[in-house]
Amino acid sequence: MEFILRFAFSNPDLDTTIVGTVNPAHLRSNVEMLERGPLPQDLYAEAKLRLAAAGSAPVAP
């Protein structure tokens, strides 16, 4: 979960990320993960490369 949250948080093209939960413990955990900041740039770049190689790349407008 931490990787996915921080990956989304690392994307400079996103202004808003909505993560919902009804469980206060999950909310605390998610906030703690995001307080660690974005992923390191090299890890973020590698994840994007792997997603693109798997056929999951953004479509240009």
Image: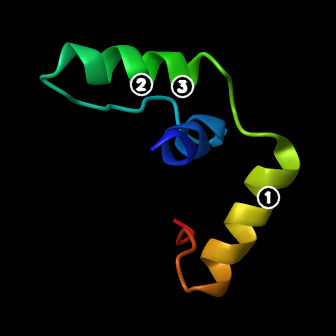
For badge 1, the amino acid type reads Ala
For badge 2, the amino acid type reads Asn
- Circle 3 is placed at which residue position? 33
Q: Which comes before the other along the chain, label 1 or label 2?
A: 2
- Residue 31: image x %, image y %? 45, 17
For label 2, the crowd category at 10 Å Cα-Cα, with few meaning under 14, some 14 to 19 and many 20 or more, is some
Residue occupying the point 61% across, 73% down: 51
Element on which disc 1 rests = helix
- Circle 1 is placed at which residue position? 45
Name the residue furthest left.
22
- Residue 20: image x %, image y %? 22, 30
Using the image as rendered, state which of residue 41 and residue 35 is in the foreground.
Answer: 35
| Figure quadrant of residue 13 | top right
Element on which disc 3 rests = helix
Residue occupying the point 63% across, 43% down: 11
Residue occupying the point 52% across, 77% down: 56
Instruction: Check whether the beta carbons of the residues at disc 3 and disc 2 lie within 8 A of each other.
Output: yes
> Considering the image in quadrants, where does the N terminus appear?
top left
Residue occupying the point 21% across, 13% down: 24
Instruction: Check whether the beta carbons of the residues at disc 3 and disc 1 lie within 8 A of each other.
Output: no
- Residue 15: image x %, image y %? 51, 30
Q: Is residue 32 left or right of residue 30?
A: right
- Circle 2 is placed at which residue position? 30
For badge 3, the amino acid type reads Met
